[in-house]
Structures are given as C-alpha cells and as structure tokens.
Image (cartoon, rainbow, N blue to C red):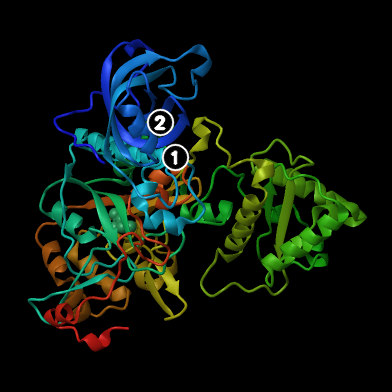
Amino acid sequence: MLDFLGTRQRTHTCGQLRAADAGQTVTLMGWVNRRRDHGNLIFLDLRDRYGITQIVLDKEISPEGHPKAEHVRPEYVVAAIGKVRLRGPESVNPKMPTGEIEIAATELLVLNDSKVPPFSPAEDAIQNEEVRLKYRYLDLRRPEMAHNLEIRHKVALAMREYLNAQGFFEIETPFLTRSTPEGARDYLVPSRVHPAHFYALPQSPQLFKQILMISGLDKYFQIVRCFRDEDLRADRQPEFTQIDLEMTFPQQDTIFQVVEGFLKSAFEVTGEKISTPFPRMTYDEAIRLYGIDKPDLRLPPMTGVRDVFTAEEVASLKIEPGLPIVAIVIPGKQAMSNTQKKAFAQEINAAVAPDLAYLDIDRLAAAPQFAALAQRIDAAAAKNCGLARVEPDHRLIVVSPRIGATPPARDHLWLYKKAGQLRLDLAKRFQDEHKAFAKKGTSDDYKFLWVTDFPFFEWDEATKTWTFAHHPFTSPHEDDLLAGRMTSDPENVRALAYDIVLNGLELGSGSIRIHRQDVQQQIFRALGMSDEEAKDRFGFFLEALQYGTPPHGGIALGLDRLVMILAGASSLREVIAFPKTAKAIDLMVDAPTPVSDAQLKELHIRPALRG
Ligand code: ASP
C-alpha cells in the first residue's frame, strides 16, 4: 500500500544535514539507495541528487514505520520524518558528507514503489552501455552522472556570465532552415505545406551569425545545438552543442582574448586553473614539430635532424637526400631486451613503410662508421625536443625517407605527418611508462594551443579539385589575395582560420570572414562553383553582403568535448543527458522509427521509399 504525500514538504535534501543539525525534526524525501535489515532496526540509505542520508527505523520509536520499511526495496521513493541525531563514534562514516548523523524516523511514507531495476544506481556504471542508455533515467540517478551534468551546467553558466559581461547578446537562430555547409550531410525535414520541399537542420548557425553582424548586433553568442549527418565515430554525436560566437571589427587577437577569458571562467568554476594567454603556432609549424594540426603539447615535439648527417652518411644509409629526417623522443620508455628491440624495429619499419624507414640508433651507435653520427643525432634530438638529454630510458626514434620516396600529390608536409602519426601511436602505447597524459593537479594538465594560418584550400584526391579546408566564408590572408595566389598558387594560400586545441583535441575552430561580396564570389569561383550555383545556394547571403557588411569573425567550440575533458569522462555520452549510440540511435525513446503511411502521405513522401 502506497502512502499519499498530502501537504508534506521536504525540509532538507539528502546531502545537507551535518552534526550541527542534531536535534532538529526534519522531513527528507528520496530514493532508497540501500536497505539493511537488522531485525528491530532497519537502515535505509536515502538518496537524491545532493547526497545520501541514513534513516533508521526503530521498532520502538516508529511502530508504524518499521513494518513499512520491511517491505521497502531499492529505488522505492519514500519520505522520512524524524529527528537528526549524532551517530555513535563507531558508526560515523567519514567518507560520507552526512556520515556523522542519521535520522531517527518517527514516520515513514512510501510514496512509490519500483520494479527491480536492470542495474542498481547505487553501483558504478555497468559495462553494458546499451542497457545504461535504454534505462537512462536510472543511469542518471548515479551520482557520477549527476556530477557530470552539474559540471556541464556550471560551465555553460560561467560562459554565459562572462560573455554577458563582455557585452555579447545571446540570440537564437532557426533550426528549420536551409542547408549551410560545414562539410557534412544535412538532416532534412520535409515540408507538409510545400510538397517536395525540405528544411535542413543547421550544421551550425554560421550564416545567421554573420548576418547578425551585418545587422549591427556587434557581439553575438549562442550555446546552440548543431546537426550533422556524418559517418559516426566514437567521439561524435549527430546532434551536439557548440558555444558559437561572432564579433564585428575583430582581429584574431580580439577573438582569442574572448575565448581565453570564457575558458578561464569555465575552468575556474570546476576548480581547475589554466594560464592565459595560450601559446600560438602556425599550421606549418604544428605539422613540422608535431606532424599534426592539433598538437598535444604534453609530449616533446619532433625535430628535423637532417643537418647532422654528412652527404656520405646519407648515401650509405640509402636516404633520399632532398627530404627531411625526423627524430621523435618517447620519454621514459623502459629498456628493452634485444629480442624486443628487434620486434620493435620491425614494427616501426612496417608502420612507416613504404616511403620511410627506421634508423635504429642503437645499431648506428654499435657500427664504427656511424657511432659519431648516432651521438650527433642524440644531441640534436635532445636539444630540439626541449630535453636536457636523451636519457637511456627515452626511446629515440628516427625515421628517414627511403631513396625514391614520393610524396602523395600536393602535400609538402606528408613526411612530417607520417612521423607525427607514429609519434602519437607510440606515445599512446607507452603512456603507462611515460605518464605524460596522467593528471598531475597543476596547470600543466591542460595544454592549450592556438593553431593559425591554416591552408585555405584542401586537395580532394577523389574529385581532383581544390575544396575549402574550413568553410567557404573564411577569409583568405589579405596578402595572398593581393598577390593573386588564389589562382596562381592555391596550395600556398593561407586562411585567416584558427583552431583551439587542448591536449591534442580540437576544441573549436573559427575564422575572420569574407565581408566583401566580390571576394566571396571569387572564392566560390575558385572552389569551382558557377555564379548560378552560388546564387542558387547562397543567394540570400550574397545579397546581404551587398548592404554594408562590416569586417567580422568568430569561432565555435564544442561544449560536449570541453565538459568531457573537465569531467574526466571517457566519452561524450557521459556528459550528454540523452545521447545517441555510435549508430545514431536513441535507445531510450527508440528513435529513429518508421512512421505511419498517413504521416508520410501528408508529407508527400511515398511509403514505397521505406526500407
Ligand atoms: N561554423 C564553424 C563550425 O561550426 C565555426 C566558425 O567558423 O565560427 O565549425
């Protein structure tokens, strides 16, 4: 038999009461986390979002409540009314914030019962994530999940407060809109009123925020959902949240300062310190030093060591003379046996094949004619990688281009990229030894970086054309425009685009935009889009650009990813209340689903189209 709530109200949460509250009469409400039956005494751990408080049902004190407690089970919802009392010294629980007290209940109301849950919210997350997602409401009862959502809330609030103080307006933009390109497929919504016409869900509010600048709103931001129908990977969600912003008359620096400011606030509210300003690196530097456009600065950079080789050494080691030789240091790699070394060498050779080869420093050092070279490489690598010296327990990996090594078409940095991939793979593999990724509780835990001067164009091998590397509203570097490189030398045109990187993860990207209609048209042409096609797709925007568009720029950062890092979570799904699986399914509501023929008909879609 369930009890009615009547007019009762809770007086405190389950995480609130302390020793100083002893003697007060209180009413707590919550879920039964655990129940222990000691005959005349029954203990209920009562849980809500705020914590857990121990309730005692003593047959003597509560002759009516005690028998009810006998029937109560985990996840029942109860109200307990009684006095706060100090626990005896032997039963104080120092691990619980409420561990010094308990409630001697005089009354117990059973407000609701519960089926036996498929897993217990009182325990750590179960392995089977599908079950967790199907019963998300139970999973979210776990304190860890509530904590993650609390971090998310605090981070979003801190950013809003910061941006508000800087004069930004939060302005909503439509979800039912037309396609704006961010390089992914659109989610389409059929129109009932306009047969065979579709809205697209925004991949980002890109054009709207630019139009808000044309409208003179000056500083815009929005914590906004974006939708991209991409091939899913573990760290992607079809709908995700961005902190999106745009400003009028900015230099890159203006935007960097705003972002550094709100990130500082966001980290502070979660008890983490970061130092600003963040270091900066051009795209070219990033690739040469780290082999990737999102360097993880927790690891030492790579270094070119071509200079320390003589021409004879290059020739006798069968190295392509015109190409760089790259050294990577993996710190703290434990010594290996000879058999292990051999296997390791084979593995690296295979990883960098066919164009690169592994120069084994130990073998060079052992060969009389190369011993001096080995020493020079060692010294150069230590110096350039920012280490005192390459310790014996560091692993120095040198990759050199084989004779005849040919770069993939139009990619002058291919060699560094390949070496950089190896660097990352090895760093991940040996992380238990070098511990560079382990949290140390200092500001070194968060290595931020701005990467600037991205190439404007990307070569698309499939279509054999140049395509935009960022999005087509990004401004090229003014110098490159003036020098006419758009047509004469597209490969070397730089974009006024920047990424913010944290610990090797891209947190966000943005750019200074094109504000002139003639330049925008030139870019569309350079991308192989005819004027008609451009007008058809972006006519409204090209039109707007002609009405006094100010210089403007902005950025968008992924909120889910940021919160994931701050919560120390292993996946985006841990910080999104109702996420989708890697196959884009919402297991709780069971979406997507087929719809009725009648609904399809209304939308002018023929049922035959259904799979
Ligand atoms: N719209 C871009 C994105 O979603 C960000 C920007 O350029 O502001 O990546």
Which residue type carries mark 1? Ala
Q: Amino acid at mark 2?
A: Asp
Judge the density around disc 2: few (<14), some (14-19), many (≥20) Cα neighbours within 10 Å.
many
In three-dimensional space, the C-alpha distance between marks 1 and 2, rounded to whole angstroms, equals: 10 Å
Quarter of the figure that contains the N terminus = top left
At a point 19% along the width and 41% down the height, the residue shown is: 168
Residue corresponding to mark 1: 122
Q: Which residue lies under the disc numbered 2?
A: 45
Q: Earlier in the sequence, mark 1 or mark 2?
A: 2
Name the one closer to the observer, 124 or 326: 124
Density class for disc 1 (Cα within 10 Å; few <14, some 14-19, many ≥20) is some
Given residues 106 and 289, the one toward you in this image is 106
Q: Residue at x 23, y 63 (%)?
A: 202
Is 158 situated left or right of 574 in this image? left
Answer with left or right where residue 375 lies relative to residue 158. right
Residue 402 drawn above or below residue 391: below
